Amino acid sequence: MNRRLILLVITLACAFANCKKDKYIAPLPPPSGPVNPQNAPLSDKPLLKDIVTPHLPNPYYHFEYDTAGVMIKADFASDFFMYNLVYDQGRLSEVQNNTFVNRDKMKYIYDSDGKVAAVNYAHEDKRVFRRCFLTFDATRLQKIEWELWDSIHFVPERTLTFTYQQDGNITEMNDQRFAVGNQTAAVTIDRYEGYDDKINKDGFSIIKPDFFDHVLLLPGVTFQKNNPGKITHTGDGVNYTVGYTYTYNNNNVPTNRTGDFVYTNGNEAGRHFVVGENYTYY
């Protein structure tokens, strides 16, 4: 069984038990004048504290902030990853993992407009082993391309492309995986529809590739302003739909999300699971 399928099986089993470049990319010089507010630190209020997902290590996501409401720590899967966020001139410059067995760092590189242009993933010895490049159309993120170092050069690993509704909510995310390392080539599409008019607090998580891959936080990027009522996943491998209902607090943010997960292909086609998340805030 290949690695990607193993990770998918692990994730489902847990969740449902209820730029071709071969050189290191050099940072661009800091912008003159104030930082573009769109790329200011991750601090949208109300401040998200925890996302708890039944049957997974919890809190699945945990965030901490300074007294100004700027995010300074982010944890994934009950401290499986423990990140410190470092800022330079008011914008996110580095995310440092701080677990005993993993000291990877993600270094952010900005373009002349103050948008994130690239992120370099480096081991503790500063060797860059992965990198990603971001492409924008005006203010919207259109594409993320990951490349992996294969001991000789960087090769394509994963490409995400996005389409949006007029209001800025994603309607479709195309995920292309390339055959590299233990990963097999695959293409999947996630379609989002039935958005509500409340505030989304977990849109950042839709680009998380697999359980064992780092969380990528992107200041100034909004994938989902609101909360989708349905997700349809098609393509290679397991296909499914999830229909969601939400409970909100007085700040119009979700406190609970409950989903009806249904397999739509294979031997499990038609089988249902209940999935969901609970959200807490500071």
Image (cartoon, rainbow, N blue to C red):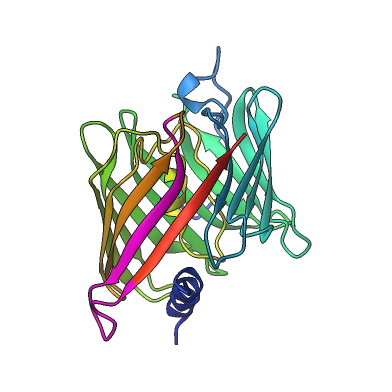
Horizontal side of 52 relative to 177 (left or right) equals right
On the image, the x and y values in percent for residue 57 come to: 61, 64
* Residue 49, picture quadrant: top right
* Residue 79, picture quadrant: bottom right
Q: Residue reaching furthest left?
A: 166
Horizontal side of 105 relative to 257 (left or right) equals right
Query: Residue at horizontal 66%, vertical 57%?
Result: 81
- Seen from the viewer's position, the closer of residues 58 and 180 is 58
Quarter placement of the N terminus: bottom left
On the image, the x and y values in percent for residue 54 come to: 53, 63
Q: In this view, does 164 lie above or below 177?
A: above
Query: Residue at horizontal 61%, vertical 43%?
Result: 107
Quarter placement of the C terminus: top right
Q: Is residue 258 above or below residue 65?
A: below
Query: Residue at horizontal 53%, vertical 43%?
Result: 217
Magenta part of the protein: which range? 252-272
Q: Can residue 24 be seen in this view?
A: no
- Seen from the viewer's position, the closer of residues 185 and 100 is 100
Horizontal side of 276 relative to 102 (left or right) equals left
Magenta stretch: includes residue 260:
yes
On the image, the x and y values in percent for residue 261 come to: 33, 66
Q: Residue reaching furthest right?
A: 100
Q: Can residue 125 be seen in this view?
A: yes
On the image, the x and y values in percent for residue 215 come to: 55, 52
